[in-house]
Image (cartoon, rainbow, N blue to C red):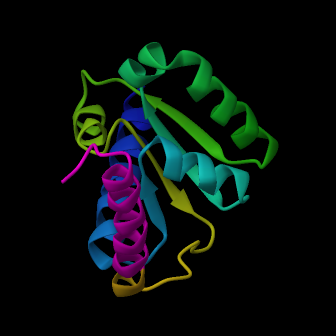
């Protein structure tokens, strides 16, 4: 049991390290982790037990796909340090075999701003925004 907790803590720390380095080798959040699994990029997936209970069907679908790509899956208790830290990352995160990032942060911001501009225009046309 202690070995599993130690391993989970180590992986969560590695996720935070990769996120801080902006290496593109760690992702968090349901949609990003799902994309990583669908792209065969995920190698370690961590999910809090709480998120698994809250979104069981969606999480189980992701974990089933993860098993098919031989990703290591860890269900982490929010009663432990690793789980509490993972909760701050929306309860789900993964380490990647390779980066999925094809854009720089600046390019991603530009893409998001263009999309947001389209939404604002649509809302204005619908008279929902002045």
Residue drawn at (45%, 34%) of the image: 47
In the rendered view, does 19 fall on the left or right side of 57?
left
Q: Is residue 105 magenta?
A: no
In the rendered image, residue 72, in percent from the top left (x then y), is placed at 63, 44
Q: Is residue 126 magenta?
A: yes
Q: Which residues fall within the magenta stretch?
A: 108-130
Q: Is residue 105 above or below residue 57?
A: below
In the rendered image, residue 1, in percent from the top left (x then y), is placed at 42, 25
Residue sitting nearer the eye, 13 or 106: 106
> What is the quadrant of residue 50 in the picture?
top left
Res. 14 in view: no
Residue sitting nearer the eye, 105 or 123: 123
Outermost residue on the top side: it is 53
In the rendered image, residue 45, in percent from the top left (x then y), is placed at 54, 45
Q: From the image, give the main secondary structure of the stretch colored magenta.
A: helix
Residue drawn at (60%, 46%) of the image: 34
Residue drawn at (59%, 26%) of the image: 58
Residue sitting nearer the eye, 91 or 122: 122
Q: Is residue 36 above or below residue 5?
A: below
Residue sitting nearer the eye, 18 or 122: 122
Residue drawn at (67%, 48%) of the image: 71
In the rendered view, does 96 fall on the left or right side of 6?
right
In the rendered view, does 65 fall on the left or right side of 12?
right
Res. 116 in view: yes
In the rendered image, residue 54, in percent from the top left (x then y), is placed at 42, 16
In the rendered view, does 24 fall on the left or right side of 71?
left
């Amino acid at each position: 049991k202690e070995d599993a907790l130690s391993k989970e803590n180590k992986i969560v720390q590695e996720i935070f390290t990769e996120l801080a380095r902006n290496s593109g080798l760690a992702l968090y959040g349901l949609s990003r982790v799902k994309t990583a699994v669908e792209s065969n990029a995920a190698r370690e997936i961590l999910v809090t037990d709480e998120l698994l209970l809250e979104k069981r069907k969606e999480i189980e679908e992701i974990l089933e796909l993860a098993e098919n790509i031989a990703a290591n899956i860890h269900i982490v208790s929010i009663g432990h340090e690793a789980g509490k830290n993972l909760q701050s990352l929306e309860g789900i995160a993964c380490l990647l075999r390779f980066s999925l990032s094809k854009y720089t942060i600046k390019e991603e911001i530009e893409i998001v701003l263009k999309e947001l501009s389209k939404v604002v225009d649509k809302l204005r046309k619908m008279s929902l925004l002045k």
